[in-house]
Amino acid sequence: GLPPPSSPLSALRGGSGPPPQRLSEDQVRSKLLELGQDHLFEGLNEGQQRGLLRQAGELNTQLPGGLEGYVESARRLLRESAEGVNPFSGFVPTVPSGEILDPEAPEYIQMEMAGQQELKHTGFVLVAGGLGERLGYDGIKVSLPLYEAERRCFLHLYISHILDMQRRGGGGTPPP
């Protein structure tokens, strides 16, 4: 869950309070324009704009403080970044404790099975890490081929593993 409101992470979260109620597409458009986000619509055709409005409307119901809280938080974080404010001041890095498991030990198998049961409740985020310019590659690094003789890329490998875990975990539910 989220840390308590008084924790150092509270400065990184969006607005406070419960998320707002669902808005119509017209209301979402008005809200975005009111918040100075008209640039989001530039270059989009009508269908793309409707898709953006649907996504923004969904986000409005999920974010603390809704779209307004999100935009306010983003502006504050950008301003503080320009001022050199470190949002992580007060944090002390620590090495977490953990287990060292032998893959052939019964405990390993038990933990593996317990983990597979939790896969249906797990989300995956891939932080791509940017372009492969230093590697002499003009695309994103995860699109690099696995092997010279193979056309599959690293991203394909990651997605294959995630899909396999999803299958083993029983599917799960789609994200909101």
Image (cartoon, rainbow, N blue to C red):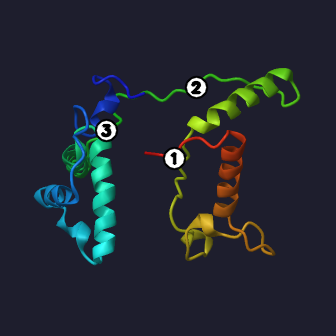
Tag nearer the camera, 3 or 2? 3
User: Mark 3 is on which residue type?
Assistant: Leu
Q: Is residue 3 above or below residue 56?
A: above
User: Mark 1 is on which residue type?
Assistant: Pro
User: Mark 2 is on which residue type?
Assistant: Pro
Q: Which residue carries the number 2 mark?
A: 96
Label 2 to label 1, Cα distance in Å?
Answer: 30 Å
State the residue in front, 127 or 15.
15
Point 48% across, 46% down: residue = 175
Q: Earlier in the sequence, mark 3 or mark 2?
A: 3
Element class at badge 2: loop
Label 3 to label 1, Cα distance in Å?
Answer: 26 Å
Element class at badge 3: loop
Label 3 to label 2, Cα distance in Å?
Answer: 22 Å
State the residue in front, 63 or 129.
63
Tell whether label 1 touches label 3 (CB within 8 Å). no
Residue 174 circle label: 1
Q: Quadrant of residue 61?
A: top left
